[in-house]
Image (spheres, helix red, strand yellow):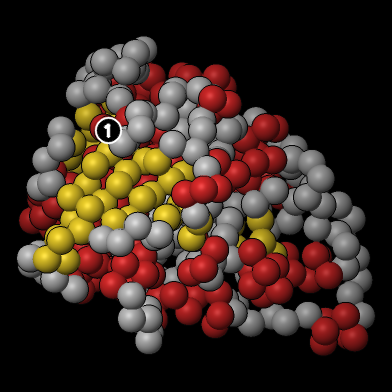
Amino acid sequence: MIQRRNFVRLVGGGAVAVATAGTLAACSLTPEYPAAAVEIWRGPGHETDVRKRAIAYAVTAPNPHNRQPWLLDVDTPDTLTLYCDTERLLPETDPFGRQILIGHGAFIELLVMALAEQGVRSEVQLWPEGELPRTLAAWSRKPVARLVLSPGARPDPLFAQVLLRHTPKMRYDTTQPVSAQALQKLIEAGGQRGGGVQSGGTVDAVRVEPLRKLCLDAARVELLTPATAMESVRLMRVGPDEILQHRDGISITSRMARIFSVLGQFDRSRPPTADSAAYKQALQTFDDYSNTAMGFVWLSTARNGRNDQIETGRAYVRQQLQATAAGVGIHPMSQALQEFPEMAPHFEAVHRMLLERPAPRTVDDSTVQMMCRIGYPFASVPATPRRPLPQFFRRAAAA
């Protein structure tokens, strides 16, 4: 959902150091992620447990800042219980946990699909011990969902796209428009699950241009709000060693960032200022994203309850799988949907532009849950690092 690989090339804009030949030789400059960090995208391998095989697919689900905030209890036979890892929340950019729970919905949908591929039916019970509250500080280890398994499911045709689905955090080809027919298929995919999720979209230049501007304006706010900027800075993983160590967060592989990191010039102790090289580079990245959008799709709900957020995630991942099948890039541009105070004017604007109504004030108000740019990437889209599978398991007694 809001992972930004190129969020910052250099943080702090400090003095440029002269690298010695020895320093450069010691710095691995390959742009690829370490193979072990993306091994999960090759599938579950020799795992024989049906549930663990399904989880191996589900952990590829899109999620904000690549936090991978999922914990599972597999101790009870024929049952899977999903919890939120409360150490992986985003309190600054996602102060009410809405986006984190959209990521849980995407996980649930892939889990159900992966079980069905093995002939296993899932009965999904949301909030078996009650919903998580609106305030993050009050979140406990209540389960998000419990899946009760039984024989008899049919495979889902979209499952073939699960390990091919990657989010294109790159420029789109502005010479290649997205057709109205391709757009309609994405809209239909976003709304086909039901669950109260409405799907919309546009490739009309008259509507696309102001949405491009809104995306860039909202990015400026996130980049220049110290608390939200530092939330991303703390999650940056620079170079192969850090990426392999953490396998989450915002992976940065750019040559210059790694050189500066080795030289001790990559300052992650403070947010970039408006006159820094870091801010200018980050804003240019968002400019590339925003102004190469060839259209937008969005998902909304009539309410903004916890079930609505879960259902949005389930609908979104199906929409992204359909986009993968069609060769279309789909990339969340969710800054304007973030609910921290400094973003309020853009939060209001996005609701008026997409739903023609004010921004939600209560859980009973219509809410834009997701907005994504669409287009055709210039290059192949890399897989995003994922943590080792054993790190996603927990025991109920640890709650």
Q: Is residue 312 visible?
A: no
What residue do we see at 60% from left, 44% from top? Answer: 87
Q: Residue 340: image x %, image y %? A: 53, 25
Q: Residue 385: image x %, image y %? A: 52, 68
What residue do we see at 64% from left, 72% from top? Answer: 244
- The one nearer the camera, 238 or 176, is 238
Q: Residue 248: image x %, image y %? A: 57, 60
Question: Is the residue marked by circle 1 packed among few (<14), some (14-19), or many (20+) residues within 10 Å?
Answer: some
Q: How many marks?
A: 1
Left or right: 91 with respect to 238? Answer: left
Residue tagged by mark 1? Answer: 307
- The one nearer the camera, 289 or 386, is 386
What residue do we see at 72% from left, 82% from top? Answer: 28
- The one nearer the camera, 60 or 290, is 60
- The one nearer the camera, 341 or 259, is 341
Q: Is residue 140 visible?
A: yes
Left or right: 359 with respect to 286? Answer: left
Quarter occupied by residue 225 = top right
What residue do we see at 83% from left, 70% from top? Answer: 262
Q: Is residue 353 above or below residue 378?
A: above
Quarter occupied by residue 382 = bottom left
Q: Residue 293: image x %, image y %? A: 34, 51
